[in-house]
Structure formats: structure tokens, C-alpha cells
């Protein structure tokens, strides 16, 4: 187990370094620079700016400097958000993204599993057909459509909930729901499928024969097995939810880090984009690692290939 | 694990929290939508109009705007100019204070100008103050900051010396690059002076809180000489037009500075008292690359300009309130009579025929059609506009390929001269020189089309020697008439800023600078 863990960690670090390197050079390849705009920039001013942000160095030098800085846990100064360091921006934005993503994950798993279970326990009934029909819609509708629709209905037309921004509890209702929708649907379908499959397993007949109450059978004998595929889906889903709120943050004008990614890219704010990518990459790699480990624990059939 | 049970619990919790939340709502701050997130609130490092908006509330320059956007005395109570126009003497108001109660003196302004132009500050708009003597040399590090043409005679008297006469200095000083910054705080905490906990400024408001991408909160500065009515202002960055409009309709903000242009007709009907349209001092134009074929030929440039109908673009295609403009200097620049493109007195048929003749003379016709690539900044309105222009050109047999890129790439390429014909824009000041300077041959790479005409240059530099505004403007007009007749650019329209403002707000007046300092606002 220790060796498996070490190898996995090593691979994760290697992937991380690769991501950082590729993104670093890709950003520099994009035409235009952080100081391009509509206004005139006299040469002396541009020289001053480039010197202030270390851009007068050669590219390999900048890359090594960046890696050294990253090693110290410093994401550098933002090129465009001049009054904040990237660390400060990530520190204010990440909690927002994580909260929205976490709430969405909560909704997706609780509602998804509940709906999947309800449908799976009564396969091919009218309830099943209805619920699965709904999940189809959930999967088919992209967030970019659902989110503005929710805003128009609950924010503008009914006036029940705020249309964007942060401030109160109310602001945390629509964004997670919109974000969770496709994931809820996917989890529901996944759960239903594996519940139906589990129902035909022999050990359930033994359990019933022992006279166990149905609720106990569901909790002890169906769910743990039926949830295995859901768990393996949860790794990428969690990463996608916690990091994938880029669209949601735009629509609801939320101060999360997803918005920094978009604006940073448009502004050629090299350090800001790098900073957000570093955080995203770290999160995604971490979740995948956690799921792999959880899987090993949950299913003894998985051999540790070391 | 009952689905209904879980759902009903969740709904109960949500409703409970919602009720709790709506109960607490008392003293209402003024909430304003700003079209994006400020990149800095350091007035010397700023770069964007949306930062200017907030900085105008936080600071007070030597001169300032009134509620109508007119230039009025600010920190300076009055000023005089020497006969040769080179020496400006400003007398500061008595009893000026920073928001921490410390006195503000002429020395603070000297410090500020030196800081703006110091190379270490890396101020991207430092060149706004290049009219000051030695400013350019100080900014490039050739001269020490002490050589800058600004000095404090005593606590209340500031003298500014210029390189050459510049009658628009009072206007130049309106911008944040001319604002004082608190030397006593910066010496102590360095760049962290812009953090809310360290913040000190001299405007009607001071910074209370700044959560990036969420809000910037300002609170009234009790040391300001003319205290504002509204206690607290919150600026929300609302970059997306639709979100901005939604939040206004949901009454979450009191004013917004952008909404989808397609909603204009509906708003005119349903939100009559809310709509505020102000034509901004600005010009959107087409620029030709005059160094390469086909547009090194003035006949081709003229032919293409002849068939563009700016009114059709603004009234029929865009329908978003923009105003057609036939001169390179926007028509709303005051005290100046702009020179319009010479063809505008001809009727449509005459222009059409002349265009075809010109093209034929230049060697283009049905057998050898002119093919051009037109570049523009990605966006719905820009796309509609450029398509319409391409269709005007199609009428005279010109085949246009449209090529759009995001803003950064667009202007980077234009500066490189990497285009044939492209959309560009310029906005800002209420003086003709600001616009006409773009076409001077040594202006550098923002003379995107590399237009070079010695006669034009001579008129412009003669104008720049005049201390008197009227004689200056006469020469500028001559230059404009000469330049526009060669069609290095085709002026199209002035941008109109579309705002929605809560009718309960008082003191809000439309003006061509589109400035609305909060200290003049109040509640009805």
C-alpha cells in the first residue's frame, strides 16, 4: 500500500509539473500581451511596465523564476489586478468557488442517489419512467441555458431570489442548483442502473429469506454495492463541480476563481491564469487520488498493481 | 431514505433562511453597477474608465467635474496662466484635509506628480502629464524626479511649468493621473496603501471595503470640504450586459451603465423614467493601412468612404443610440467646429457613381474586383456594423472578407500595422487635438494606418505652439480639413452610453463625459 501510494504521488506531481509547463508556454504563445489595449503606450512607459513585471527577462529565465516562486508557494503579483497578489485573489475567490461547488456536490449526490434509488427499486413502473425522463432533460440541458433561465424565472419575473452577486444566504441557492443539475441527473441514472442490477443478485434472496425488513435490505445489501460506480464517478464529478463553475460564476457574477480564469486569459494576465490553473490542477489531481484510494478501500477485489 | 422527506426538509430550510434574510434590511447604500472589476484603485496606475468612475469619488484633483461634467475648481480654488502659456499657478483651497484629518498641502501635489512620472511606478498613463516640463525625460529615467516642472511655492501655491503651451491643462488635471496621493501613508506601508485598512484619500469618499469581483464599498469622508449627501456607495462589477440588466430589473442595483442594446425599444416603452442616454466624447472609425496596396492609393480609400452611410449604421443597423458622426473630431467637442468629410454634401447617386469611377481609375472593376479584409473586435454589435459596411461596399463591386479577434489581439495587430482596413475607436477629451494627434506621422504605433502628410504635421505642430485656444483651434481645423480629405480614416459614429438610473436618485445629469460624481447625488 505504501509503495502504491508513493508511485501514485510521484505520478501526480509529474502531471502537475507538466500542466504548469504547458500552460506557462501556451499563455506566452497567445498573441498580444498584458499591456496591450486601446490606449497609447509610449516606449518608455512600456519599458517601465515590462521591467516592473519581470517581462524584460528571457522566456526560459522567466520560466525558471516562476517555478522557483511556485516552489515557495508564491503565485506572484497579478499583472492586471495591480492591488492584489495572485495569492490574495485566490484566497478570496477559492472559498466562493468551493462553497458553490460543495453545495452543488451535496445536491447532486443526495438528490441524485435518492431519485436513482426510487426509480431503481421499482424498475419499469410509471415512477421510473417519469424520473428517468426528467434526468434525461437534466443531462441534455447545458448549464449555460439552465442558469440564465433560473435567473429570469426566480430572479427577474418572480423576484424571490437575487439574480447574481454574493451577500446573503439567498445568493447561495440558484447557483449550486444550476451547477448541480447535470450531475444530479447523471448520478440518478447511474444509481438506478446499478440498483436494478443489484436487485437480481442472489444474496438479496438470502437476506429476504432471513426475514430482514426491506429498509434494512436497502441500506445494508443494496446501497453499498450499488454505490460503487457512483463513487468512481464522484471523483471527476467533484473536481468538475468544484472547478467547473466558470460558466456559473459568469452568469451569476460570482467572485470565484473561475472568473479570474476567463478574465485573466482575455487580459493576458499571465500570473493570474497560471495561479488559477495551478489551483485547479492541484484540486483535480487531489480528487482523483482520493477516489483511487477510496476505491481500493471499498472494493477488496481491486488488486494493488504494484 | 425517503425522497419526499429529504426534499421537504431541504425546502423548509431554504424557506426559513430566506425569511430570516429578508427581515434585516435598513439603511440603504447607493448601489451602482460598474462595467467591470477595477484593476487598481491607485490613481497613478489606473488605466480604465470604470476605474476613473470610482477614483473620481475617492479623490479630488486640482480641477474637477461638476454634476454636468463641466470643469470647475477642485483642490485649487483658482489658477492663473502666464502670457506665454508656459507657467500655471494654482492657489489651493484653505483647510484641505486628507481623510485621516492630516492637512493637504501643495507639497502633496509635487510628491504625486513626481511619483506618477517615476519609472518605478510603471504608470501606463504617465504620458497624460507629458505636457509638464521634463516629464518625458523623468519618466524614461533620463532626469531625476526633482527636475520635473512642478514646485510648491508655499503650502497653498503650486506652480506647474510646461514644455510647450497647453491650454487644455485644466482638463488634463481632471484625470486620476493628476490626483494627489497620501505621501505620509505610502512612506509607511508602501504599495499596501491601497488596502482598505490603510486607505487615505482626499475626495468626498474613502475606501471602506474591496472584495475583488464582488464589490467596492466607499464611505463618506467627513473631512471633505463639501460633505456628500449619500453615506455609503457600493460599486458592483457588472461586466455582462444581460446580468447587469437582470440585476437592475430585480432592483438589486440603483443604476447600471450597460444593458443589451436589443432591449432599448422595450426599455423606451416600459422604463421611461429610467433610461439615460449620453453621447460620449468619442469617435468610432475605420482606419486604412496607408502604407500598403490597395489603401496606399487615396482614390481607393475615398471610393470606399463615399458609399458608407453612417446614419444607416446607427439608425437602422445598430439601433442602440449611437450617433453618426461625419468628422474625425466628435461633433460634441465644444468650442470647435469640426471639418466633415468633403463628400457628405453629395447625394447618394452622385457618391455611388464617383466611387465606381475612382475605383476604375485605380484599376479595379467587374473583371478585376477589389478584395479587402476588414478587421474588427469580436462582438454582436460590431459584427452587424461591419456586415453592413461590407454590403455598402458590395454595391460598388468590392468583395470584403471579415475577420474578427478579441480586443487585445485586434489592437496589438493594429499597432503592428498588420491589417488592411480595421475598426478602431478613440474617446476621452473635450479638445480636438486629442483626436487629431492620432494622425500625426510621429505619433507612433497608434497612428495605426501610418498616415504621414508633412502639410498635416506642419499645421499640427504650428497649432501646438499656440497658447490661445481660439488660434489653436483655427489651425487644428485646417489640419482636420486637410487630413480628412485624404481619407486616412472614415469617421463613423460617436458611442452613446446607455444607462438605467433609478428615478429616486437626484442630481444625475447626462453629459458628454459621462461622469456622475456621487457627491452630487441624493435621494428623492
Image (cartoon, rainbow, N blue to C red):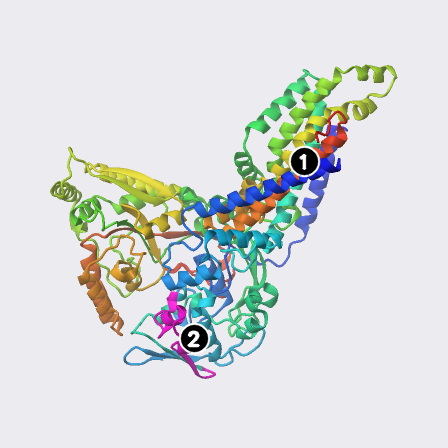
Does B275 sit above or below residue B80?
A: above
Q: Who is closer to the viewer here, A19 or B197?
A: A19
Q: Locate the N terminus of chain A and report the quarter of the image it occupies.
A: top right
- Label annotation for residue B145: 2
Horizontal placement of B253 versus B375: left or right? right
Magenta span includes B424: no
Chain label for disc 1: A
Chain label for disc 2: B
Range covered by the magenta-colored residues? B127-156
Q: Which type of secondary structure does the marked residue at label 1 adopt?
A: helix
Q: Locate the C terminus of chain A and report the quarter of the image it occupies.
A: top right
Image coordinates of residue B70 in percent, x first then y, are 38, 67
Magenta span includes B148: yes
Do the residues at discs 1 and 2 belong to one chain?
A: no
Image coordinates of residue B488 in percent, x first then y, are 23, 52
Asked where in the image residue B48 lies, by quadrant, the reply is: bottom left
Does B247 sit above or below residue A141?
A: below
1 vs 2, front mark: 2
Amino acid at each position: 500500500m505504501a509503495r502504491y501510494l508513493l508511485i501514485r504521488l510521484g505520478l501526480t506531481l509529474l502531471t502537475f509539473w507538466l500542466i504548469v509547463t504547458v500552460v506557462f508556454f501556451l499563455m506566452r504563445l497567445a498573441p498580444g500581451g498584458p499591456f496591450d489595449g486601446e490606449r497609447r503606450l509610449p516606449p518608455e512607459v512600456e519599458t517601465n511596465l515590462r521591467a516592473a513585471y519581470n517581462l524584460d527577462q528571457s522566456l526560459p529565465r522567466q520560466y525558471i523564476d516562476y517555478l522557483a516562486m511556485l516552489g515557495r508557494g508564491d503565485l506572484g503579483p497579478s499583472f492586471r489586478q495591480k492591488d492584489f497578489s495572485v495569492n490574495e485573489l485566490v484566497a478570496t475567490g477559492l472559498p466562493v468557488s468551493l462553497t458553490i461547488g460543495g453545495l452543488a456536490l451535496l445536491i447532486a449526490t443526495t438528490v441524485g442517489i435518492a431519485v436513482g434509488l426510487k426509480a431503481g427499486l421499482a424498475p419499469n413502473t410509471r415512477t421510473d419512467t417519469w424520473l428517468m425522463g426528467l434526468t434525461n432533460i437534466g443531462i441534455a440541458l447545458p448549464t449555460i441555458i439552465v442558469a440564465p433561465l433560473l435567473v429570469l424565472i426566480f430572479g427577474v419575473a418572480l423576484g424571490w431570489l437575487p439574480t447574481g452577486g454574493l451577500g446573503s444566504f439567498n445568493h447561495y441557492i440558484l447557483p449550486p442548483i444550476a451547477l448541480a443539475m447535470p450531475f444530479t441527473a447523471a448520478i440518478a441514472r447511474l444509481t438506478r442502473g446499478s440498483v436494478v442490477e443489484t436487485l437480481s443478485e442472489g444474496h438479496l434472496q438470502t437476506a429476504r429469506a432471513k426475514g430482514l425488513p426491506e429498509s434494512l435490505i436497502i441500506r445494508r445489501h443494496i446501497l453499498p454495492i450499488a454505490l460503487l460506480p457512483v463513487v468512481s464517478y464522484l471523483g471527476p464529478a467533484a473536481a468538475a463541480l468544484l472547478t467547473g463553475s466558470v460558466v456559473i460564476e459568469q452568469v451569476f457574477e460570482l467572485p470565484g476563481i473561475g472568473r479570474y480564469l476567463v478574465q485573466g486569459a482575455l487580459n493576458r494576465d499571465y500570473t493570474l491564469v497560471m495561479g488559477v490553473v495551478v489551483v485547479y490542477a492541484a484540486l483535480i489531481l487531489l480528487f482523483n487520488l482520493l477516489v483511487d484510494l477510496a476505491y481500493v478501500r471499498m472494493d477488496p477485489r481491486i488488486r494493488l498493481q504494484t | 431514505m425517503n425522497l419526499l422527506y429529504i426534499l421537504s426538509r431541504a425546502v423548509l430550510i431554504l424557506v426559513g433562511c430566506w425569511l430570516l434574510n429578508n427581515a434585516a434590511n435598513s439603511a440603504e447604500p447607493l448601489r451602482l453597477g460598474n462595467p467591470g472589476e477595477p484593476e487598481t484603485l491607485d490613481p497613478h496606475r489606473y488605466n480604465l474608465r470604470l476605474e476613473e468612475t470610482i477614483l473620481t469619488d475617492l479623490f479630488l484633483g486640482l480641477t474637477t467635474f461638476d454634476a454636468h461634467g463641466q470643469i470647475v475648481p477642485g483642490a485649487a480654488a483658482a489658477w492663473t496662466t502666464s502670457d506665454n502659456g508656459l507657467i500655471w499657478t494654482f492657489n489651493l483651497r484653505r483647510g484641505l484635509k486628507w481623510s485621516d484629518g492630516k492637512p493637504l498641502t501643495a507639497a502633496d501635489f509635487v510628491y504625486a506628480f513626481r511619483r506618477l512620472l517615476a519609472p518605478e511606478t510603471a504608470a501606463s498613463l504617465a504620458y497624460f502629464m507629458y505636457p509638464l516640463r521634463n516629464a518625458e525625460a523623468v519618466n524614461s529615467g533620463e532626469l531625476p524626479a526633482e527636475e520635473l516642472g512642478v514646485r510648491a511655492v508655499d503650502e497653498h501655491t503650486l506652480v506647474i511649468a510646461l514644455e510647450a503651451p497647453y491650454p487644455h491643462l485644466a482638463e488634463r488635471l481632471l484625470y486620476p493621473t493628476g490626483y494627489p496621493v497620501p505621501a505620509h501613508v505610502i512612506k509607511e506601508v508602501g504599495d499596501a496603501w491601497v488596502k482598505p485598512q490603510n486607505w487615505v484619500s482626499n475626495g468626498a469618499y474613502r475606501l471602506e471595503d474591496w472584495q475583488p469581483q464582488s464589490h467596492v464599498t466607499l464611505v463618506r469622508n467627513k473631512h471633505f470640504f463639501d460633505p456628500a449627501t449619500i453615506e455609503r456607495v457600493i460599486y458592483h462589477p457588472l461586466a455582462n450586459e444581460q446580468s447587469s440588466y437582470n440585476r437592475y430589473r430585480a432592483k438589486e442595483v440603483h443604476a447600471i451603465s450597460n444593458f443589451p442594446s436589443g432591449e432599448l425599444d422595450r426599455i423606451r416603452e416600459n422604463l421611461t423614467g429610467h433610461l439615460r442616454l449620453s453621447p460620449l466624447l468619442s469617435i468610432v472609425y475605420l482606419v486604412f493601412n496607408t502604407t500598403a496596396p490597395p489603401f496606399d492609393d487615396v482614390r481607393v480609400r475615398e471610393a470606399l468612404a463615399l458609399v458608407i452611410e453612417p446614419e444607416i449604421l446607427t439608425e437602422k443597423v445598430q439601433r442602440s443610440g449611437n450617433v453618426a458622426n461625419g468628422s474625425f473630431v466628435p461633433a460634441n467637442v465644444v468650442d470647435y467646429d469640426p471639418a466633415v468629410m468633403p463628400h457628405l454634401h453629395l447625394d447618394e447617386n452622385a457618391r455611388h457613381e464617383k466611387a465606381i469611377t475612382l475605383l476604375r481609375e485605380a484599376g479595379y472593376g467587374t473583371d478585376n474586383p477589389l478584395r479587402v479584409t476588414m478587421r474588427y473586435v469580436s462582438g454582436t454589435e460590431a459584427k452587424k456594423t461591419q456586415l453592413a459596411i461590407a454590403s455598402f461596399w458590395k454595391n460598388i463591386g468590392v468583395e470584403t472578407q471579415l475577420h474578427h479577434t478579441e480586443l487585445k489581439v485586434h489592437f496589438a495587430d493594429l499597432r503592428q500595422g498588420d491589417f488592411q482596413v480595421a475598426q478602431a475607436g478613440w474617446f476621452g477629451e473635450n479638445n480636438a487635438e486629442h483626436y487629431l494627434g492620432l494622425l500625426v506621422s510621429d505619433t507612433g504605433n497608434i497612428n495605426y494606418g501610418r498616415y504621414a502628410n508633412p502639410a498635416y504635421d506642419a499645421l499640427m505642430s504650428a497649432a501646438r505652439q499656440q497658447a490661445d485656444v481660439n488660434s489653436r483651434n483655427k489651425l487644428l481645423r485646417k489640419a482636420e480639413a486637410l487630413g480628412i480629405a485624404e481619407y486616412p480614416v472614415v469617421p463613423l459614429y460617436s458611442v452613446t452610453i446607455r444607462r438605467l438610473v433609478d428615478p429616486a436618485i437626484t442630481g444625475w445629469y447626462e453629459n458628454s463625459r459621462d461622469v456622475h460624481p456621487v457627491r452630487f447625488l441624493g435621494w428623492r
